[in-house]
Amino acid sequence: MATDSVSRGDFLHSKTVSATHPPKIFFVVPCCNEEAVLVHTANVLEVKYQQLVQKTAISRDSRIIFVDDGSKDQTWSIIHKLHEGNEKLFGGVRLAHNRGHQNALYAGLMCALKEGCDAAISMDADLQDDVGIVEKFIEHYVKGDEIVFGVRSARKKDTWFKKTSAEIFYKVFSWMGAETVPNHADYRLMSRVALEALSEYQEVNLFLRGIVPMLGFRTSKVYYERGERVAGDSKYPLKKMIAFAVQGITSFSTRPLSFVTFAGSVSVLVGFLMFVYVLVSLFAGKAIAGWGSLMCSVWMIGGFIMLSLGIVGEYVGKIYLEVKHRPRYCIETEL
């Protein structure tokens, strides 16, 4: 199957990529309350677009699509003004309600696919991802790669906590049997073939960093150093980071459910040992000493039960959301 996928991609490239017919690339940028940085981001991307067009690396029909994920500030007004100023280059998609970064990104990618792009490059609006490596993305695409991952070469600018927690997440994710690309966020190029394959995934609980590596096809990596935000505040505080990690793990692995079984077995074993301890204490005439062990047992078993219920509840909740088949997002306006 892998060979067939690659050959299909190579055929696509041979038909669309040439000096006279450079690829039609769409830049997809999800935004949520990014009024402080959006104009600067648009200017930087426009300059990069002009450079790539002059080098015939991309088609003049390439576009930049901003996806407004239910912003409460002036983000959509800015997108609208950008579109009015250059309708050919800037497009916009406004979701009717905040649906989260992953759904907003997916909406933009599907719009790019619908508009007939040859490939789409996704990136965050804060410009922490190095726009300078876009040319390398396209070079890999022209050579036949269907997916090109932007991977951080180092985490020197991260705090100790953020760096350590990220390493733990990737190790846990890998241990649970899910495939991911360490130190890769959502800065990537996906060809039309890859986007069509992505459109076949129907789950509501999206975790693109896990889904995209599962697609197969021919992939490559481009390394870069992540910079600081140009302006505005991070949209991923600790609470959202933890929720995002839980979303990823529970969407791609059932091993936490196996942990429930293991925890239950440990609880039964500890309970049996405590029973033996109580009997020995009784015959030795030291039954009063059992108060502390009894309390420890109650709290430990109670903790295991609550933890197990929580893990099972995560999966039941996901099943509940999936079986209703609600749409991932609703588009209010499309420019």
Image: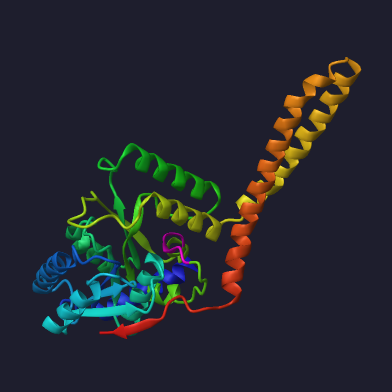
Residue 107 drawn at (x, y percent): 37, 76
* Residue 65 versus residue 206 in the image, above or below: below
Q: Residue at x 11, y 81 (%)?
A: 85
Question: Splitting the image into 4 quarters, where does residue 166 fall?
Answer: top left
Q: Is residue 247 magenta?
A: no
Most common SS among magenta residues: helix
Residue 201 drawn at (x, y percent): 49, 73
Residue 162 drawn at (x, y percent): 36, 43
* Residue 114 versus residue 306 in the image, above or below: below
Is residue 23 visible in the rendered image? The answer is no
Residue 256 or residue 58, whichever sits in front: 256
Q: Is residue 203 left or right of residue 277?
A: left
Q: Is residue 294 left or right of residue 109?
A: right
Question: Splitting the image into 4 quarters, where does residue 59 fall?
Answer: bottom left
Residue 263 drawn at (x, y percent): 69, 42
* Residue 160 versus residue 257 in the image, above or below: above
Q: In this picture, which residue range is highlighted in magenta?
A: 206-210
Quarter in which the C terminus is drawn:
bottom left
Q: Is residue 64 left or right of residue 180?
A: left
Q: Is residue 280 left or right of residue 71?
A: right
* Residue 132 versus residue 293 in the image, above or below: below
Most distant residue in the right direction? 283
Q: How many marks?
A: 0
Q: Residue at x 76, y 30 (%)?
A: 294
Q: Residue at x 36, y 61 (%)?
A: 219
Residue 265 or residue 12, whichever sits in front: 265
Is residue 155 visible in the rendered image? The answer is yes
Q: Residue at x 21, y 59 (%)?
A: 127
